[in-house]
Each structure stands twice: as structure tokens, then as C-alpha cells.
């Protein structure tokens, strides 16, 4: 038993690996996420909004450079940061970009834009 | 040799069961398929664990699996901010809001109600384990009816089994405790795994693929 156990482990490991590869073939991600989720956690933890905006702006350049797809909520998150930093024009721009990329967000983005007194442009 | 083969096959069966590829009991997806939700609004999760970080650690990590499954996920921080501005800061209160009202404001097709039942590190003699367990309910915001329910758990110990020998285990335990206390939030990476397990589509029990996935309609 003590001799066969390592072999058993190796076998099980190989099986697990091949099952993961063959059985549940991992599809390519739909979006290029970069630091979106960690930055959202930073927001909830009350970290510097200026730094979060800089990180998301930097990552947006990375996504553009690779011609990747921006994840849902990314531009809206930037809009939220801009609004709390008092950069309202940029906020409006980001909410409109979210809406253009994801029409599913239209009702909510319009709600936010009208609350901000800007009205839904475009 | 035959005994070893039997063990291998048995091991493979167990692995298959846990990998999420295995066939499970048949789940009724008829209401889910009929509702065809395109967008999902995530409520701040209820927290039944003693760690106050659980709600927002989980909330900040549920977008990934749902978006990759093909849904539009309403921006979680912005949504939480809208709730705040309307005097709703407690997940308990937000979970009680009428679905139709949520649909009116956010325009989302479905709501996801998550409960975190376990979040944190347990210190034991031989190993400390950080465990995050959560359950979720997907609700049609037009009708208020439940479309899907599920639960998942993850532990920091999963990849550390069989470190070999008692001394090895004690070393790992000590190391884990240093890392866990050095970090602000040992549950955060584990919550990410729990979230992915909870909300990645799999046959007979998982959520279904959404309209933005190339696999939409295949399950």
C-alpha cells in the first residue's frame, strides 16, 4: 500500500487534469477583466477613489491595446468614481459608453443620468 | 495490480463527481427557460458568518462568472450606491424589496439573492482552513418567481491535501496561520472560487448560459 500510494496519487492527478481538459473544456473568456473586480472591492473598502480611477483608466488602455472586450459594468464603475470625484462630464461619458456597449443597462443609465440632472444625451 | 486499477477507477469516479461534469438529478429548468433573462441585478449578499467583510467580498466577485456565462450584470458598486442613496444600507432590507420595484428602477430581468453562510478561517490542530460557503436564488423580477437555486463551497485546504507526513502538515498549518493573519482578508480569494463554482453553468444544477454566450440555448 505504501508503495502504490504515490502512484495512485499521480494517476489521480493525471485523471483530474485530463478530465478538466477533456470533460469540461474551458472556453475562452468573453471579456478582458483586468482589475475590475479587485477595484470594485477597493471601492467597497473605502480606498482612494482617485487611485481606483487611475487603475481602471490604465487597464482600459490595456484592453484597447489587445482589442479585448470591456466587461459589463466597467464603464459604469468608472462613471461612479468620476461622479464622486466631481468630474461630471466624464461621468456622463462613461454612463453613455456603458449604455452603448450594453443596451441592457439603458434603463438604469438613463435613470442615473436624469438624476444627475444631465438628462440622457445621444 | 487489479486492486490498483480498481482504486484508479474509483478515484476517477470520485473526481468526476466533484468536477461538476457528472450527471446529477434532473433539475426542472422550464420556468428559467421560459423567462430567458438577459440581465441580472445582484443584491448585496446576506451575511450569516461572523465576519463583516463577507457581504462585499462576495458582492465584488459575483460579476465575473455571471458575465462569462453570458448575462449582463448590473454594475454592483453603482447599484449598491443607488440603494444607499435611498436609505437602504442593510442587505436584509434590500432582499425584502418588491421585485417589480427593482425592475422599474434598474430595468433588470432577474435578481440574484446570495447568502453567505460561512466566511473565515478555522484554526485547528493540524491545519487552518479558510472556508467560504454561499447559496443563491435567481428570481424573475417581472413575476417574482424563483428560476434557479444553488449552493457552493470552497476551502483553502483543497490543494493542500497529502502534504506528506505529520511534520509536513504542521509546517503547512503554521505557514497558513502566518499568511492568514498577515493578510487583511484571507476569505477574499476563497470567495472568488466559491462564486465561480456557484455561478458557472453546468448541466443539471447550474445556472444556464445567457444570451451573450455562444453556448446560449445549448443547455
Image (tube, rainbow, N blue to C red):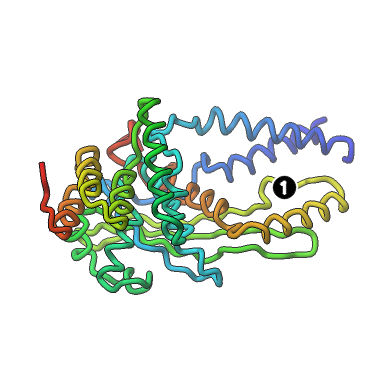
Image point 78% across, 46% down: which residue?
A: B162
- For the C terminus of chain A, give its image quadrant: top left
User: In the picture, residue A115 is in which quadrant?
Assistant: bottom left
User: In the picture, residue A111 is in which quadrant?
Assistant: bottom left
B164 or B148, which is in the foreground? B164
Image point 27% across, 63% down: which residue?
A: B82
Label 1 neighbourhood size at 10 Å, few (<14), some (14-19), many (20+)? few
Element carrying mark 1: helix
B134 or A11, which is in the foreground? B134
Which residue does the numbered mark 1 point to in the structure image? Answer: B160
User: In the picture, residue B97 is in which quadrant?
Assistant: bottom left
Residue farthest top in this picture? A66
User: Where in the figure is residue A4, as x and y percent of width and height?
Assistant: 85, 35
Horizontal side, residue B170 vs residue A83: left or right:
right
User: Where in the figure is residue B164, as x and y percent of width and height?
Assistant: 83, 45
Give the vertical position of B180 relative to B25 (above or below): below
User: Where in the figure is residue B100, as x and y percent of width and height?
Assistant: 19, 64
Chain of the residue under label 1: B
- For the N terminus of chain A, give its image quadrant: top right
Amino acid at each position: 500500500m505504501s508503495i502504490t500510494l504515490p502512484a495512485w496519487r499521480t494517476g489521480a492527478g493525471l485523471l483530474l487534469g485530463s478530465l478538466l481538459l477533456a470533460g469540461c473544456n474551458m472556453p475562452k473568456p468573453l471579456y478582458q477583466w483586468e482589475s475590475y473586480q479587485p477595484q470594485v472591492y477597493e471601492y467597497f473598502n473605502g480606498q482612494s477613489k482617485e487611485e481606483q480611477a487611475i487603475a481602471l483608466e490604465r487597464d482600459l488602455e490595456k484592453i484597447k491595446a489587445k482589442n479585448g472586450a470591456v466587461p459589463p459594468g466597467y464603464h459604469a464603475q468608472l462613471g461612479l468614481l468620476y461622479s464622486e470625484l466631481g468630474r461630471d462630464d466624464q461621468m456622463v461619458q462613461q454612463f453613455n459608453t456603458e449604455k452603448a456597449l450594453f443596451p441592457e443597462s439603458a434603463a438604469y443609465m438613463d435613470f442615473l443620468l436624469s438624476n444627475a440632472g444631465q438628462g440622457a444625451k445621444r | 495490480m487489479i486492486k490498483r486499477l480498481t482504486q484508479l477507477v474509483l478515484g476517477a469516479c470520485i473526481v468526476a463527481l466533484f468536477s461538476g461534469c457528472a450527471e446529477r438529478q434532473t433539475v426542472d429548468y422550464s420556468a428559467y427557460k421560459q423567462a430567458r433573462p438577459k440581465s441580472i441585478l445582484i443584491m448585496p449578499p446576506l451575511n450569516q458568518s461572523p465576519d463583516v467583510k463577507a457581504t462585499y467580498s462576495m458582492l465584488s466577485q459575483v460579476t465575473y462568472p455571471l458575465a462569462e456565462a453570458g448575462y449582463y450584470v448590473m454594475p454592483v458598486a453603482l447599484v449598491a450606491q443607488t440603494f444607499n442613496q435611498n436609505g437602504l444600507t442593510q442587505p436584509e432590507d434590500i432582499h425584502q424589496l418588491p421585485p417589480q420595484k427593482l425592475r422599474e428602477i434598474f430595468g433588470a430581468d432577474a435578481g440574484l439573492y446570495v447568502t453567505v453562510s460561512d466566511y473565515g478561517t478555522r484554526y485547528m490542530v493540524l491545519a487552518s482552513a479558510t472556508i467560504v460557503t454561499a447559496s443563491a436564488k435567481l428570481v424573475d423580477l417581472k413575476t417574482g418567481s424563483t428560476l434557479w437555486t444553488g449552493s457552493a463551497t470552497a476551502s483553502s485546504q483543497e490543494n493542500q491535501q497529502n502534504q506528506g507526513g505529520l511534520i509536513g502538515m504542521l509546517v503547512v498549518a503554521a505557514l497558513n496561520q502566518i499568511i492568514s493573519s498577515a493578510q487583511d482578508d484571507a476569505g477574499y480569494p476563497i470567495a472568488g472560487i466559491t462564486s465561480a463554482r456557484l455561478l458557472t453553468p453546468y448541466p443539471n444544477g447550474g445556472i444556464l448560459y445567457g444570451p451573450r454566450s455562444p453556448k446560449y440555448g445549448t443547455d
